[in-house]
């Protein structure tokens, strides 16, 4: 995901946030974090530093999104869980992946309905 895609996702879902690129605040002293300013009642907060991938920062800001990589990973994990479900494990016990399958199905549904950012 590029910065422009990240910025567009933020602007589409959080009009109460202003973001700046790495190093574009604090006199260019912060090269590894993004600047985030929250707007409440028309007033700007101080600049908060956020670090991580763009996807991780979107999660921290409660902005729904999906990436192709994440969708592919969830699909692969779900397929593996469904394939193992009902088989015998090493100890002769029947594998019950019901909870995990339901959790991954719900996550996949959420991802497929979220905006795709890559």
Image (cartoon, grey):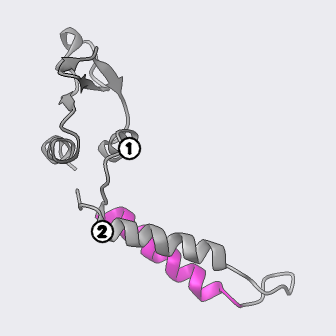
In-image side of 18 versus 93 (left or right): left
Image disc number at residue 56: 1
Image disc number at residue 113: 2
Q: Quadrant of residue 91?
A: bottom right
Crowding at dot 2, Cα within 10 Å, few <14 / some 14-19 / many 20+, comes out as few
Secondary structure beneath disc 2? Answer: helix
In-image side of 2 versus 38 (left or right): left
Is residue 83 shown in magenta?
Answer: yes
User: Vertical placement of 96 versus 118: above or below?
Assistant: below
Structural distance between the alpha carbons of marks 1 and 2:
18 Å
Image disc number at residue 40: none
- Dominant secondary structure of the residues highlighted in magenta in the image: helix
Q: Position of residue 33 (x, y in %)?
A: 31, 26
Pick whichever, 115 or 68, lies toward us.
Answer: 115
Pick whichever, 62 or 58, lies toward us.
Answer: 62
Q: Are marks 1 and 2 in contact (CB under 8 Å)?
A: no
Tell me the magenta residue range.
Answer: 68-86
In-image side of 69 versus 2 (left or right): right
The residue positioned 51% from the left and 71% from the top of the image is 104
The residue positioned 20% from the left and 14% from the top of the image is 28
The residue positioned 61% from the left and 72% from the top of the image is 100
The residue positioned 27% from the left and 17% from the top of the image is 45
User: Vertical placement of 73 versus 91: above or below?
Assistant: above
């Amino acid at each position: 995901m590029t910065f422009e895609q990240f910025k567009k996702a933020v602007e589409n879902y959080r009009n109460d946030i202003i973001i700046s690129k790495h190093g574009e605040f604090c006199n260019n002293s912060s090269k590894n974090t993004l600047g985030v300013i929250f707007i409440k009642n028309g007033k700007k907060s101080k600049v908060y530093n956020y670090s991580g991938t763009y996807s991780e920062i979107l999660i921290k800001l409660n902005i729904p999104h999906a990436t192709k990589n994440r969708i592919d990973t969830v699909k692969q994990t779900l397929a593996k869980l469904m394939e193992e479900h009902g088989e015998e494990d090493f100890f002769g016990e029947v594998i019950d992946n019901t909870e995990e399958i339901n959790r991954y199905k719900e996550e996949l549904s959420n991802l497929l309905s979220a905006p795709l950012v890559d």
